Amino acid sequence: MLSPSTRRVDLTLKRSRYEDAGCPSYWVVDPDGPSITTWVLQGDRYVDSGHVSGDQSLDVTTPYPLILVPARLLD
């Protein structure tokens, strides 16, 4: 989850390190949005796999099937 003190690290350094380590997916939850952004590893690089905010739903299959709604995560 993003916070003001870790936002830059989470979106750049941490994402890059997980990508280099071969982590199959990377998700960022931003409570200020609220929003969720996801990436999946294709080859050796992350590609965007979804972004939703508020009451929109995000249907992901990796690493397992799940439907996420950012606004509901704050309840």
Image (spheres, rainbow, N blue to C red):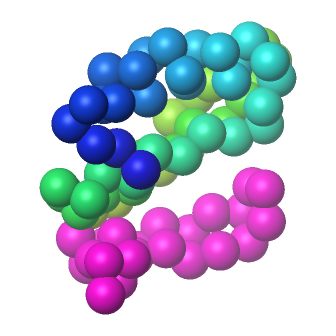
Q: Is residue 75 above or below residue 62?
A: below
Residue range corresponding to the magenta coloring: 54-75
Q: Is residue 33 above or below residue 27?
A: below
- Examine the structure image and report whether residue 63 is included in the region drawn in magenta: yes
Residue drawn 62% across and 24% down? 46
Q: Is residue 63 left or right of residue 4?
A: right
30 or 64: nearer the viewer: 30
Q: Is residue 68 above or below residue 45?
A: below
User: Residue lying furthest front in this view?
Assistant: 5
36 or 59: nearer the viewer: 36
Q: Is residue 75 left or right of residue 17?
A: left
- Residue 45 visible (yes or no): no
Q: Is residue 15 left or right of residue 75?
A: right
- Residue 3 picture location, percent across and down: 28, 43
- Examine the structure image and report whether residue 37 is included in the region drawn in magenta: no
Q: Is residue 73 left or right of residue 55?
A: right
